[in-house]
Image: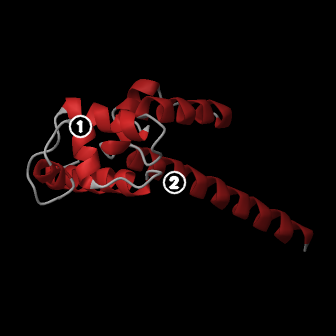
Amino acid sequence: MNQDLLKEIMAERIKTCRKNHVPKMTQIELAKKLGVDKALMSKYENPKYPDMPPHRVLNQIGDIFEVSLDYLNGRVDDPHTTLSEYIEQVSRANKMIGMSFSKEELKSLDQQKIDKIIQYMRDQVNLALSESSNKSNSTKL
């Protein structure tokens, strides 16, 4: 993922977490909790600002909003799942359907790429089922 896209995703997710928090949190309130000034907090939520929050701040944001760093970094779409947990889920599903992707192979991918593989597999299964159904219908005629 390129840096501009990463910054855009991170800025949007920080803002979304802050606005969806119960009770809703202002930039000033979040800045105080993080120990940064409001201007810097505003920059963290601005995808045009070139610098991303340091790890210390990202860890604090994750703790405050109870979301994973993988979510803030755009590696997974579920705020409460880490990439490792997602890979574990996909790995178990692979074994159930007889696929042979190793965890190491999956770790080299992000969630979007893994989801594309899963969608491709679903499409292939549906195609095979459709072809099988068409063959059985044609033999009955």
Of all residues, the one furthest to the bottom in this rendering is 141
Query: Counting other residues with Cα less than 10 Å from the Cα at mark 1, is it few (<14), some (14-19), or many (20 or more)?
Result: some
Q: Nearer the viewer, residue 24 or 126?
A: 24
Of all residues, the one furthest to the right in this rendering is 140
Q: Which residue is mark 2?
A: 120
Q: Position of residue 17 (x, y in %)?
A: 38, 51
Q: Position of residue 58 (x, y in %)?
A: 26, 36
Q: Amino acid at mark 1?
A: Leu
Mark sitting on residue 111? none
Residue under the image location 83 percent in, 70 percent down:
138
Which secondary structure lies at badge 1? helix
Report whether residue 4 is seen. Answer: yes
Is 7 located above or below residue 108 in the figure? Answer: below
Query: To which quarter of the image does residue 53 belong?
Result: top left
Mark sitting on residue 34? 1
Is 79 located above or below residue 42 in the figure? Answer: above
Residue under the image location 49 percent in, 30 percent down:
85
In space, the residues marked 2 and 1 are separated at their CA atoms by: 42 Å
Query: To which quarter of the image does residue 36 belong?
Result: top left
Q: Nearer the viewer, residue 47 or 2?
A: 47
Q: Amino acid at mark 2?
A: Tyr
Report whether residue 99 is seen. Answer: no
